Amino acid sequence: MSFLAPLFLLGGLAIALPVVFHLVRRSSREKQIFSSLMFLKPTPPRMTRRNRLEHILLLLLRCLAVCILAFAFARPFLQKPMAARPTNTAGAQVVILVDTSASMKRDGVWAEALEKAEAAFKKATPADRVAVLTFDDQVRSLLSFEQWAAMNASERTAIAAQRLSEAKPTWHATHLGNALVAAAETITDAEKREPHTGPRRIVLITDLQEGSRLDGLQGHEWPRGLEVVVEPVKAKRPTNASLQWVMDADESAQTTSDAPVRIRVSNSTDSKREQFQVRWAGVTGDSLDAYVPPGQSRIVPAPKLATNAAAERITLSGDEEDFDNTAYVVQLKADEVNVLYLGNDAETDSAQSLYYLKRAFQDTRRQAVRLITDEAARRTPFSTTNPPPRLGGYKLAIVTSTLSEGRSDEVRQFLTNGGTALLVMNDPQMANTLGILIGTPNVGVTEASVANYAMFGQMDFTHPLLAPFSDPRFGDFTKIRFWKHRKLASEKLPDARVVASYDDNDPAILEVPAGRGRVFVLTFSWRPADGQFALSSKFVPLLYSLLDQASGASAPLAQFRVGDPVDLSAFATKLSGSTLSVHKPDGAQVQLAANETRFTQTDQPGIYEISTAPIPVKFAVNLDASESKTAPLPADELERLGVPMKSGELTPALAAAKQETLHNAELEARQKLWRWLIVAALAVLLVETWLAGWITRRSAARAEATA
Amino acid sequence: MSALAATQSFAKPNAPAPASKLISPQALMAIKNLELRARIVVEGFWHGIHRSPYHGFSVEFTEYRQYSPGDDPRYLDWRLFARSDRYYIKKFEDETNLRCYLLVDHSRSMDYGSLGWTKSQYANTLAATLAYFLHQQGDAVGLLTFDEQIRDYLPARNRIGHLRRLMLQLEQATAGTATDLVAPLQRIVEIVRKRSLMVLISDFLAPIEALERNLTTLTASGHEVMLFQVLDPAELTFNFDRAVMFRDVESGRDLFIDPATARREYLSRLNDHNEAVRATCQRLGAGYRSFDTNRALELAMFDFLRERHQRSKSTNRFARSRK
């Protein structure tokens, strides 16, 4: 007979309680009335003498109940010899997963990782199968199971260590979650090819930094019997601050020239310092002090550069790790967009269209719009080398008056070449101009009869022009009222697409294709005499949306993270026939294939240059900000995400003891002797209750008889 | 022979009546009527000393004083004037008579009794007996019952019907919760200005210090004081055999007491207390008698008279030495 919880047997000492209670003279419930207790002192309960133990049988029953209970709590079971453990002769499948992200560049970290990896190689028995994977934001296989198996057993460690030492930490971010999943899949894939019964293990060698991405682990179904052993490597010095370039929004009112470059200085949570210096590298100038407490970040303006000084790197000093102390910055230049205005309006007349147009097009960080009136265009000398097409330098032509024949042909030519024009119907006579531009004579346009006022009715928010308004927050056009507008018979323009119409179903905005280009027709004008459109909040966004349609503008190249693909399609269209080539910061030149517009080799931070563009275009590639969060993850974070962690190696003696404990627990759970003991205790208590009741009744009867 | 002389003869060692002739308290207490009980005791007592009680022993020498203008002419002794041709004033008869106040403890501790009757019943019977006896002699008897405060008060008188009222008040149930001798004694000092005999009947199961202070006040006011302590035999012997919870009848406090261990100390402390009461009485010149409730009441009467006699002797001695 053995016990699972022998300490509970000490509960058997509680049999002293019933014995003591039996020895204590019963302090009866009787009360003796007495005249005064002033001469009396309370008597402590007194034991009766041993030979006066009353109700021996009752006492024995009570002691027995206590003993049985203590016995039951000790969980007794009948010992049976443990079956011999099946000896597992099959070796283990081990994936050694080594972190090569940018944070491993810290001082001493990579060397320690190599040491740990080598130790893991050495620990592998000849029967084990080992694969070596490295990971940053993607997983690379250095050594597969098959390669390991093919090698001579005595050379395996050396070769694996050699391969690993050839790998170096990259500049990429840490996607730890994906890497763990990939390692688990490597094992399951290998088992599919070749069934295997031994234990399965992933040895993870990483700095377990806070910035590791673990989202790949959410809800992942781990194969049974897999264990993850984490071999953390630790940086010698914890203080690490980093630097990121913060870009302003495109719509920011500040233009490039007057806005300072803003940078974010972050400090890791386990940092020991708080004071850092920021300065431009490569130019003389003052440095800027930044105070950032551990675990926080501050956005500070970079020090002012001297005029005409060109600098592309901002560096941070004051922390202990250098790998993330440089931010690369490119000075953005706004696109120059020329818009030709063809109309007879005076710039200063607030009753006319141009007055409003001039004020609507303001310079932004992204675009500098130049509105050129017809007169000014005529004055502009065109060189002989760059004359045709006259309107080729313009993105958009805005027509607000009837054009002369020659002018109309020019605009038509512009449209045929793929230009975009906006025709504003100031009066019905402009129907002729429209007819010439789109090549459809007899476009019937009349002045509409508006009883009180007209409003927009149907709006086609699926059209790219109105796409910016498709959000319900911005799509309310009901506040715009028109006193006058023109009526255009849209059935005469079968190719036209009605973008917006009035509440009486007359078209208000139409898109009419013309050659390779297109004409947007407004059957109203934004002159105050026609309606409230120029003063509404929709006027300026609509003009910019039109400008976007006209120029086909896309987001400018500025900043990317290491590993991000860069879309160069905007440049590809300009370079018909030739291929794109990109200069990397280390001097290498990458030639893209003929149809390829994505540049994917952003594998190091620095300034990249697209050299084949007419004007060289630069963009900055910076380190992923999460890579600078170098404080270690909480130890239980992986476990919380369901990763099957192995706490540590057990010694054989401990393992045997654990095995025996498990065996005993299993035996006990199967036999469940405690249940019978509890039943026995209950039975004894029942007998005890009955006996006590019987004794009480008997003594009561006796007392009555004597009374 | 006055009753006092009778007690003198009774006090001799060969004189006491045999115990069998005494009325047992058990038989006496079976009688419901208090007055009847008192009469039985008193008449049995007279029967024991074979003397008529109707001469009265408080009739003391009456003093004459020469008349001076302003005295009440009603009190002129005309017979003496006839004999001596002098005006003499006769001193008031009631001044010479005994005024006795019975101070009876009606606190709840007196409600205890282990013999079938309580200390209170015994004390009432004793008081009634004394009252009846004194009334028969023509002495004025007053009554004051108390617990922690004064319950009833009857001034000392000797009128028809007074005894009956006194008996009725004695028969009233005990009500108080505590024994407080301070308040009744102070009160009686305030009320009774004339020199009187104060008979205090209680168990005196109360702190001794306050008792001493108030008895001093009483004796200093010229009153003659007698203390009759009434205790139950169970209180005197503490002959309980089982360890049980004891409940204080006055305070309701419960204590677990094993009589086997507590008896010795209890008796010693009770004796100390009683001794302290006795010593206090002795020091103040007050009489003190202690009874248990199983004692025949006639003996209590004899105790009373003997005490009176001894005191009158000492008073006479004191008076002679003053002369």
Image: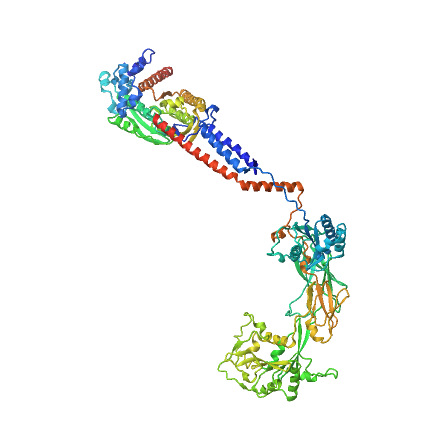
Displayed quadrant of residue B46: top left
Is A505 displayed left or right of B273 in the figure?
right
Is B131 displayed left or right of A78 in the figure?
left
Q: In which quarter of the image is the N terminus of chain A?
A: top right
- Relative depth, front residue between A288 and A689: A689
Q: In which quarter of the image is the C terminus of chain A?
A: top left
Q: In this view, does A113 lie above or below A299?
A: above
Q: Is residue A297 above or below residue A685?
A: below
Q: In this view, does A528 lie above or below A639?
A: below
Q: Is residue A27 above or below residue A495?
A: above
- Relative depth, front residue between A244 and B190: A244
Q: Can residue B67 be seen in this view?
A: no
Measuring from the top left, give residue A125's x and y in whole percent: 71, 48
Is B310 displayed left or right of A481 in the figure?
left
Total tally of numbered discs in the picture: 0
Measuring from the top left, give residue B201's x and y in whole percent: 35, 24
Measuring from the top left, give residue A134's x and y in whole percent: 70, 56
Colour option used: rainbow
